[in-house]
Structure formats: C-alpha cells, structure tokens
Amino acid sequence: MISLTASDRSSSRRVRSATAGPGYAGDTALRLVIIATALMVAAPGSMASTVATPILERHLSAEREAAADRPRSEQDQAVVDGWPLYRTPRGQEAFNQAMATLQVTAGPPPAQSRFVGCANLACRLDLPRLNPSGWLPAGRLWVAPDKFIVIVRSPRLPRHRSYRRRSRRSMRVFVFHEFHNATRNTDVYDTISSHRGSVFTPFYLSKPQRDANGHTFATLVQVAPYDVVSRHAANFGNRGPGIEVAKNRGDPLAPIQAKAGIIIATIIKRAVPRIRVVHHRGVEGLLLRHAYRRHRKMATGRTIRLPFVRAGADHLLFAKARLGDLIHRPGHRRSITRVAEVPLRPPAPRLVSTGWHRRVVDRIRVGELLPVGRQDQDPIGALIRSLNAPRAGPPFGQ
C-alpha cells in the first residue's frame, strides 16, 4: 500500500486548492499532469515494492553475502527475492541479459514444416550474420519446434572502451574449448565472470536448460567481437577466435550444444572462409569438432533459413518477468526474502509530451497500485477521485 508523507499530503492539499479556485481551466490533460506529479512525490520505497524491476537491473548493486559459495551449475545459485543472485556483478549482468533476451523473444514455436529437409541440421544453413562491428544480433534461433538457442550480447568492456580487433587475413583458426575447471562448475555466467584481462574467448555456450514451456535451449553468449585478439583461444600459433563450452572432462556433449557449436562455427566460417575449425588440445573440444565435420559432410540439398526472433534493444531495457515464467528450475534452492536497507528507487517515468498541458505518464497505471477491492486504502486513488468529483463554486471562466 502506498503511504504519503506529511509533505506529500500538504502538496496534495495545495493541488486541490489550486484546482478548485476560480479561473481553473479544468481540462482533462492538465488533470493528468497533476495526477502524475502526485504519483512521483509518493514514497519511493512503497512505490518500488509495487513496480517490477526491469530484468537488466536486478541485483546489480546488491550485496553478495547471500550468494551461493560453491555453485556447480545455474540451478545451484541462491534465489534472493525471487531472482538468482550471482557472486559477482559481471556474472549477474550476463545472466540478466540472457533472461531479458529470453523474455522479449518469447512466442509460439515455429511449425514443423519450417524444418522439413533439415533434421538435425543436415542441410545448408541460412543463419544470422555478423555485423561490421563483429557482433551477432541478439535473439532466439529455433533449431526444431521444441529446441532453440538464445543468442545474447554481453559486452565485457564498457561502451566508451574499444576492442583490439584483427584483420580477417590474420585469422587462421576457430577453436572449440571446454571449461575443464577444478571446481567442475558449469555455470556459464560464473565462467564469464572469472575470465578477466586477456583470459577470455569471444563466445560462451551454456549447458542445456528448459524454459517455462518445456522447450530445450542453450545460451550462446557473445562478450566481444568475433575477431578480437584472444590469447585464451590461441591454438596452432594463432590467437583465436574461439568458444568456451560448458563441459568438463568426462561430461557428455548434449545434442543442443552440438547444434549450437555447428551454428557458431558455420557463422564464423561464412565470415572468414579460409579459417579452420579445430579443437583445443587432447580431447578438449574434440566432440564438437567431430559434430561440425559430420555436419559439413551431410550439409547437402537445399538451404534452410532457421527461424530467428530478433531481440530489440529497446525491448530489452524494459523486459520484466518472474523467474518461473522464463525457465524451469527443478529442485531449486529455497527463495530468500531479504529486507532492503535502502529503499529501492523506482524507474524514472517516461513522459510522452505533445504540449505543455499534455504530459502523461505512460509507465504508471493507477489501477495497478492496489488490488481490486482495496482502492479505498489508496491515497492517490482518493486524490484522483476528488479531482474528478463535481465541485461547487462559480462556473468556469467566472
């Protein structure tokens, strides 16, 4: 429930007295301005508790003491206030970007007819292209009616910094890597967070997951342009590019991971035809390399354009959803409810202006402030009703 402070109530009285006197124009647009002003001066902490935080902003500035100490997968992360809390802001940022992309590209799956002649990707593929800046478009790429790959952009550098990129002539290999870490943690966002400095690859591939509708998917995260200088992806005397795959020694390669590896290698090969697709060393990346080579031999016949749903940048900024509406988390840990020490700041209202007398808040819906049947407890609702009620006094213009 929203509560007004003493200063807020005095502001409300001033608003009412200003609108009740002689000479008040009384048009609806100006009333909306007054309502919006009253909403914005309401207690920030109370209002924030009723408005969902955009996915991209969740837990970015939170304390990390409640995060899981030794997670081994995405399912092991602590859920705080209904949302996974990662140990570092970088891991949190990458996870949030993946979930926002998942939300804005949600929709009905494509029909089976879209994949005729391309079972298990045994066809020539028409895939999203790299842009001149070296980035793939964010979105959802369907590989079957019940399987898809989420392509996520999560830049490792802030916008004001540039990447050290290479010419296509100097790129000789694309390297399949695997995690092979001592902790056996396969959480792709933890791995992205742990790769600092020159230790990184442009692409990271997650373990299989299921969304809220039961579809199988894997997340392909791009953190830098494909042609960035990457010492970690070096092989055969050449510094990448490459991809890190969520797979430890002895783990099986999931079919959706094999499909994602085939897709990213095909995209890179199209951009740099002379590049060789190789594995790192020993058995690391060997299964993915074999899957790609089998695809090359079987990719005959017609070309199939896989269904792709692009994630618009504007939509990502305002994406909102509950965790349970996005992904299926079997046996996830108990959700922790934490009392915030500092009230959350509500998102700034976005104003649509067609003149000084028509500034309307389009991101706040008065009907959403309280459940139906409790509007009598809403001071803002009372203010609105009082403004709309007939007033005694001289007619307008007198």
Image (tube, grey):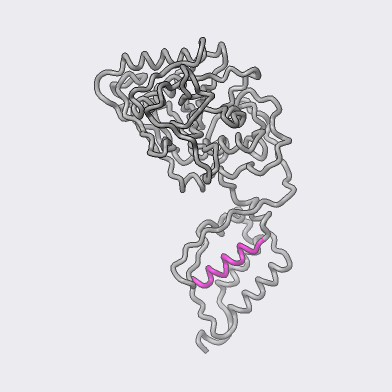
Residue 302 drawn above or below residue 223? above
Horizontal side of 82 relative to 277 (left or right) equals right
**Magenta span includes 47:** no
Horizontal side of 135 relative to 125 (left or right) equals right
Q: Which of 6 and 251 is in front in this view?
A: 251
How many numbered marks are there? 0
Horizontal side of 300 relative to 168 (left or right) equals left
**Residue 211 seen in the current view:** yes
What's the residue at 45%, 18% (across, down)?
A: 255
> Which quarter of the rendering shows the N terminus?
bottom right
**Residue 102 seen in the current view:** no
Question: For the stretch drawn in magenta, what is the main secondary structure?
Answer: helix
Residue 126 drawn above or below residue 105? above
Where residue 196 appears, x then y in whole percent?
A: 60, 31
What's the residue at 46%, 13% (across, down)?
A: 287
Q: Which of 259 and 382 is in front in this view?
A: 259
What's the residue at 51%, 47% (across, down)?
A: 317
Where residue 242 appears, x then y in whole percent?
A: 47, 24
Farthest bottom residue?
A: 398
Q: Nearer the viewer, residue 97 or 182?
A: 182
Farthest left residue?
A: 301
Where residue 311 appears, x then y in whole percent?
A: 43, 41
Where residue 155 appears, x then y in whole percent?
A: 52, 38
Residue 34 drawn above or below residue 183? below
What's the residue at 43%, 28% (across, down)?
A: 148
Magenta extent: 28-42
Horizontal side of 78 relative to 177 (left or right) equals right
**Magenta span includes 35:** yes
